[in-house]
């Protein structure tokens, strides 16, 4: 049976492909800044936005975008202050976000736990035409920002002080990344789920780093892996009736394991073939160290 004869499967596939492109394009900057789990935290905050949307009978995607953007800006401002109490403020924000979401969803007239699970882990049938339009517009905006400002964003992520001395608008760029992270998390919640979208930002980047060295090639490979995992995950979830978010993430992790094993085997074979001690020393460096500001 052709799964894509159903309109909801086509909508789920298109939204997954958009997320598969957008999440790794943003995630490579978060990995470089050692903020791999920020998407998970924003997902907690976005759940409150979902609760507001269900309670007020408005689009949960739109209300989640608004609430999570406000939360992301607050997280960035707390991070910028760099005080010890920042961790406590972040924890209060994250836990307050998920608690607020659970309470508001419970107060709404939706089917409680079923609605909550759909947003936490994704669902094939919940992406409406209105949601798909929002996902396409916001996804395109995030993708244009990540690709168009690639050099400036990488400079900020690699060395924030140097970027500031060089005259780059560091605060504006940091806030832009916070806002785009919030937008990416919220547009992915229909397909991947709020608790798993962070994995789609990080795992394709980690997999790409096993076989690439330059920043641009790593970004391109990560986006390719993200799209492949998203398309295969949606199809497999439709075939075996599993949660799409979990299926996509498991496939992405499988790609990471395969590339890690394959890359290690390839390097071992090259060393045995006499690639030389100097070359072997370079390959022993962690992949993210090799990403340089001038790499293109």
Image: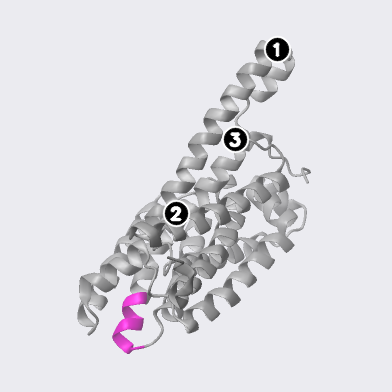
Check if mark 1's residue and mark 3's residue have beta carbons within 8 Å: no
Q: Position of residue 66 (x, y in %)?
A: 46, 78
The furthest residue to the front:
1
In front of the other: label 1 or label 3? 1
Distance CA(mark 3)–CA(mark 2): 20 Å
Check if mark 3's residue and mark 2's residue have beta carbons within 8 Å: no
Q: Residues within 10 Å of mark 1 (few under 14, many from 20)?
A: few
Q: Which mark is residue 210?
A: 3
Judge whether residue 56 is colored magenta. Answer: yes
Judge whether residue 152 is colored magenta. Answer: no
Q: Position of residue 125 (x, y in %)?
A: 38, 73
Q: Which mark is residue 273?
A: 1
Name the residue tied to disc 2.
248
Residue at 22% across, 70% down: 113
Q: Is residue 261 above or below residue 73?
A: above
Figure quadrant of the N terminus: bottom left
Distance CA(mark 1)–CA(mark 2): 37 Å
Badge 2 marks a residue whose secondary structure is: helix
Question: Which residues are the magenta region?
Answer: 50-57
Residue at 66% across, 49% down: 219
Residue at 52% across, 28% down: 261
Q: Residues within 10 Å of mark 2 (few under 14, many from 20)?
A: many
Residue 73 at least partly seen: no
Which is the main secondary structure of the residues drawn in magenta? helix
Residue 88, quarter of picture: bottom left
Q: Is residue 159 above or below residue 151?
A: above
């Amino acid at each position: 049976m052709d799964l894509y004869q159903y309109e909801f499967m086509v909508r789920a596939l298109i939204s997954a492909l958009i997320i598969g492109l957008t999440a790794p394009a943003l995630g490579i900057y978060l990995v470089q800044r050692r903020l791999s789990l920020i998407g998970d935290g924003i997902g907690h905050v976005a759940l409150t936005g979902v609760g507001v949307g269900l309670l007020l009978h408005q689009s949960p995607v739109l209300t989640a975008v608004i609430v999570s953007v406000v939360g992301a800006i607050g997280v960035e401002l707390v991070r910028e202050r760099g005080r010890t109490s920042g961790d406590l403020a972040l924890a209060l924000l994250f836990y307050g976000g998920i608690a607020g979401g659970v309470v508001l969803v419970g107060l709404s007239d939706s089917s409680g736990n079923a609605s909550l699970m759909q947003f936490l882990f994704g669902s094939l049938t919940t992406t409406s035409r209105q949601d798909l339009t929002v996902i396409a517009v916001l996804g395109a905006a995030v993708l244009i920002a990540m690709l168009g400002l690639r050099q400036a964003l990488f400079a900020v992520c690699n060395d924030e002080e140097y970027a500031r001395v060089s005259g780059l608008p560091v605060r504006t760029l940091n806030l832009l990344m916070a806002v785009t992270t919030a937008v990416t998390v919220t547009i992915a919640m229909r397909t991947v789920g709020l608790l798993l979208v962070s994995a789609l930002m990080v795992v394709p980047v980690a997999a790409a780093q096993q076989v690439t060295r330059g920043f641009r090639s790593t970004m391109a490979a990560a986006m390719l892996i993200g799209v492949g995992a998203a398309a295969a995950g949606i199809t497999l979830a439709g075939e075996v009736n599993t949660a799409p978010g979990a299926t996509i993430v498991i496939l992405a992790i499988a790609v990471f394991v395969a590339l890690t094993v394959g890359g290690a085997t390839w390097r071992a074979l090259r060393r045995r073939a006499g690639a030389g001690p100097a070359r072997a020393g370079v390959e022993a460096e962690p992949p993210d160290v090799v990403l340089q500001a001038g790499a293109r």
